[in-house]
Amino acid sequence: MSKKEISLEIILSIIAIIAIIFIFNQVLKRITTNAFENSSLIIASVSQSYLVTYFYVFLGIIGSVGVFALIFGIFSVLALYKHKNDNAPIFILTLNLNKNQNPLYLFLISAFLGIISTILLIISVFSNYYFLFFISILFGVIAFSISSALTTFLCAKYVIRFLFRYTESI
Amino acid sequence: MIIPTNVQFNLIEGLIIPALLLIFSITLLIIIFLIFIRRFSSATSVVISRIALIKGNWWKISIILISPGIGALFSIIAILNPIYLSIYLYFYGALIVIILIEILIFVLLEELQKPLIKI
């Protein structure tokens, strides 16, 4: 590494540490000043007309993505049960996932988003910002949709074709 | 949907304990998953992983593949309930699914580390 990159990294890390201390101080002030009666959860549950509509949109996304994941998962379970003596789908999965560019690493992004969303939800319940409640639900929806889309992709590409009989054309 | 405002939401059971458990379990899952990917997709352990996975593990891999569907079932149940109950359902459903995946990946890793002579 060159000297310029190292100095830039040091400056950026110092700025990030100062920003984290500032944000944490502000959050702690908010948490200590506001009791649970002023929390964002109760504001979101009382103001039905504004925020609950977004809540239903997110729930609709979860439902529509999750139904696909459920259907493809049931088909993959049937395919794996059909080839339980042969184990051809597991063989194809192990063959095709032995690459440098592995799609399984996208699960890690969804896991990090899940951690961020839970932390934001705790902060939003103890504070007054109901925008954080909104953002935490958004991150959770994105995490769930990434993981379910990846499993549907894996099932559709490698596993489900063993469920159906194919006739090899001569 | 009618939301009653004077409902006592249990803060400790409903939010703090499951949220901390979720953070702990997701960090564990990240560590386990990194180990699993490194062992599963490295070039040296290709043959061992194939032979170990082919033996009789079809139901473990099928449960891993259907696990987002189980989470979606919990979320669909939670849509039909009001908000103060749906938070319980989301948290505990996600916890159940994540712990199930962790146990299954632990078992698969244990079987991947067995030597070839036993087969």
Image (cartoon, rainbow, N blue to C red):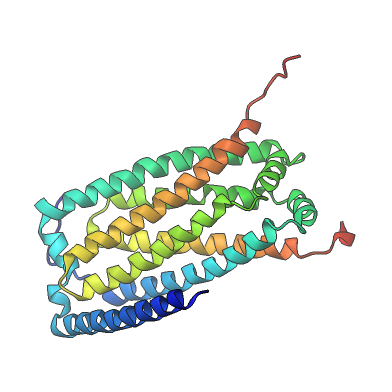
Q: Is residue B1 left or right of residue A4?
A: left
Query: As displayed, is residue A139 above or below residue B13?
Result: above
Residue lying at the far right in this picture: please name it. B117
Which residue is rendered at x = 72% and y = 41% of the image?
A84
State whether residue A78 appears in this view. Answer: no
Residue shown at 10% from the left, 58% from the top:
A47
Q: Camera-side residue: B8 or A86?
A: A86
Could you tell whether B57 is left or right of A33 in the image? right
Can you say which quadrant of the picture contains the C terminus of chain B?
A: bottom right
Image quadrant assignment for residue A85: top right
Residue shown at 47%/67% (left/top)? B26
A129 above or below B79?
Answer: below
Q: Is residue B27 left or right of residue A139?
A: right
Q: Is residue B55 left or right of residue A157?
A: right
Q: Which residue reaches farthest front?
A: A3
Q: Total number of numbered labels?
A: 0
The residue at the point 62 percent across, 59 percent down is B37
Q: Which is more toward the observer, A59 or A103?
A: A103
Give the percent coordinates (x, y) of residue A59. Answer: 29, 48
Could you tell me if residue B5 is visible in this image? yes
Q: Is residue A116 above or below residue A29?
A: above
The quadrant in which residue A39 appears is bottom left
Task: Say which of B83 and A162 sits in front.
Answer: A162
Where residue A21 appears, as percent x and y from the top left, is 28, 84
What percent of the width, then of the height, locates residue A41? 19, 66
Where is B19 relative to B64, above or below? below
